[in-house]
Structure formats: C-alpha cells, structure tokens
Image (spheres, grey):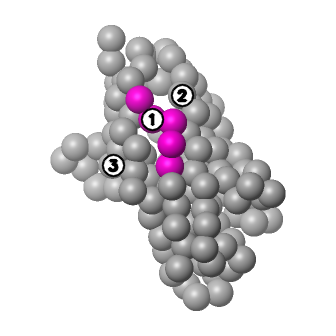
Amino acid sequence: QVQLVESGGGLVQPGGSLRLSCAASGRVFGINVRGWGRQAPGKQRGLVATITSGGNINYADSVKGRFTISMDNAKNTVYLQMNSLKPEDTAVYYCYAEDGTWGTHSWGQGTQVTVSS
C-alpha cells in the first residue's frame, strides 16, 4: 500500500503562485505514474497533471502553460508549481499515484488551494 502526504496549499491572490509537494511512502517501487488532481465544490475530481516513470508529462488544458509538475525520485516526492493562479483554480488538490504492477490507484488526503483577492 502507498501513502501519499501533500503539503503547500493555502490562500493566494489571483496571479500569484504556490508550490505543492507530495511525499510517497510504503510500497513505492511499483509506481509508474504520479500526478495531481483537484476537486472544486460541486464538481468531480479530475487529474490536472501527470508524470510517468519514463518522464512523460501531461497537463489538462485548463492548466497548460501555468502549472509545472516535477519529480524528485531520490525523495519519492512530486511537486506541482502553480503560477498565474486564477479564482477558478480554487479546489482541494490531491496527490495521485498509479501502481503498474498491481493496477491500483492511490490518492492523498488533499490540500486546499484558494485563489481570492
């Protein structure tokens, strides 16, 4: 089983930046995809950025050019740098991991990001 712990959320003004971090522990050797999802009130959770063990990166159209996902393999930590934040980015952000060996998906507990003046 994989444990994912996020940090770095908070309140930021429109146009500002935040960096989220997610540390993985436990059964991490089978993870082949890491990422971030978000869920706004009244909406479904969806992935916004993913990175594979091979370094392939994908972004949702809504965050392309503003968000950057990166990975520190030595620390088993994935980051999400969020720039030019907009009020519509307000959501609970969840860390995500996919285990290619077992075919399982894991989510962190979530961290709140609020973009407001």
Amino acid type indicated by mark 2: Leu
Q: Quadrant of residue 9?
A: top left
In the rendered structure, the answer to whether residue 68 lies left or right of residue 113 reads right
In the foreground, 116 or 42? 116
Would you say residue 86 sits in the magenta stretch? no
Q: Position of residue 31 (x, y in %)?
A: 66, 73
Pinpoint residue 80: horizontal percent, then vertical percent.
Answer: 60, 41
Which disc is residue 39 wearing? Answer: 3
Instruction: Say which residue appears at 78% left-offset and 58% top-offset.
Output: 73
Amino acid carrying mark 3 in the image: Gln
Report if residue 79 is visible in the image. yes
Along the line of sight, the residue nearer the viewer: 43 or 8: 8
Hey, which residue is sitting farthest front in the picture? 26
Question: Given contact means CB atoms under 8 Å apart, are the residues at marks 1 and 2 in contact?
Answer: yes
Question: Is 85 situated above or below 71?
Answer: above
Instruction: Say which residue label 1 marks.
Output: 9
Decide: is 28 above or below 111: below
Q: Residue at x 52, y 67 (%)?
A: 3
Residue 115 coordinates in the image, percent (x, y):
37, 24
Residue 38 visible from this viewpoint: no
Give the crowd class for mark 2: few <14, some 14-19, many >=20 residues within 10 Å.
some
Q: Amino acid at mark 1?
A: Gly
Please provide the residue range marked out in magenta.
Answer: 6-10
Point out which mark residue 18 bears. Answer: 2
Q: Residue furthest left?
A: 42
